[in-house]
Amino acid sequence: MRILVVEDEKKVSRFIKKGLEQEGYAVDVAYDGMEGQQLIETHEYDCIILDIMLPKKSGIELLKDIKDRPGEPIVLLLTARDTVEDRVEGLNLGADDYLTKPFAFEELLARIRALLRRGSVTGAELKFADLSLDTQKRKAKRGDKEIELTLKEYSLLEYLLRNPDRVLSRTLIAEHVWDQSFDSETNVVDVYINHLRSKLDKGFTKKLIHTVRGVGYVLKEE
C-alpha cells in the first residue's frame, strides 16, 4: 500500500516515514500543501496522512481538493490543535479519522490499519480462491500451506489481492509498492513477482498469478 505524508515538521515526517516503511508500506513525503497537491495529482495513494497547519496551502484546503477527486484515498488528519471545532471541520470535509499531536507511532499505525480494513469489504482478511492474507497478523496461506513473506512480498500480495481479476501494469504495481524514488526502468517488479509466484503457485495445479504480455500481471483463476 502506498501512503503520502504531508507534514512540514521534518522530524515528525521522518519519524512517520521510517516507521511505516519498517511495516512494509511505500511512503512519499511532502513538506507543504503545494508539494502535497503536486504528488496527489501525479500519483495514486491508498492513504494520505495530512497535517492541518501547512505552509503554502493548508491541510483543510488540500483536503477539499482531495475529496473532489475520483477514487479518493483514505485521509487521516494530524494536528496540534485539539479543539472540537477543528475535529468537526475536518471530519465534515470528508476526513476519515483525526489524530492529535503528540502521538505514539503504535496508535498511528493502528488507526491506518483500521481505516484500510474499513475500506475493504473483506475486512481484516483478504481472500481469493484458496489464497488468504490476514492483514492484522500479516500471514498468508494457500490452502493449508502457510507462506512466509518478506515485507515487499507482503505489500505486493496485498495489492494483488485488493485488485483481483484486474490487469495491473508494472508501473501501477511499482507506484503502490515502492515510493517515488523507485527506478521504473529496473526489473525489480518482475523479480518480486517471480519470488511471489514460487511461493504461491509452486506445487499447486491452479496458478493464480498470470503474466499479461506487454502489460503486467493479474491475479485470477485459470
Image: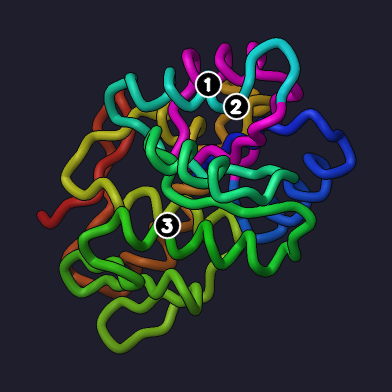
Q: Amino acid at mark 1?
A: Leu
Task: Judge from the rendering whether residue 219 lies leftward or rightward of residue 88; answer left or right.
Answer: left
Residue 134 lies left or right of residue 9; in this view the side is left
Q: Position of residue 42 (x, y in %)?
A: 49, 14
Instruction: Tell whether label 1 touches label 2 (CB within 8 Å).
Output: yes
- Foreground pick, 193 / 2: 2
Give the residue number, with chain letter if any, for mark 3: 115
The magenta region covers 26-53
Q: What residue appears at the point 41 percent right and 29 percent down from the top-left corner?
A: 172
Residue bearing the label numbered 2: 59
Residue 74 visible in the displayed image:
no
Look at 76% across and 24% down and name the residue there. 31
Mark 3 or mark 2, whichever is nearer to me: 2
Q: How many marks?
A: 3
Q: Is residue 88 above or below residue 8?
A: below
Q: Nearer the viewer, mark 3 or mark 1?
A: 1
Question: For the residue marked with disc 3, what is the amino acid?
Answer: Leu
Height in image: 147 above or below 120? Answer: below
The residue nearer to you, when weighing 71 against 66, is: 66
The secondary element bearing badge 1 is classed as helix
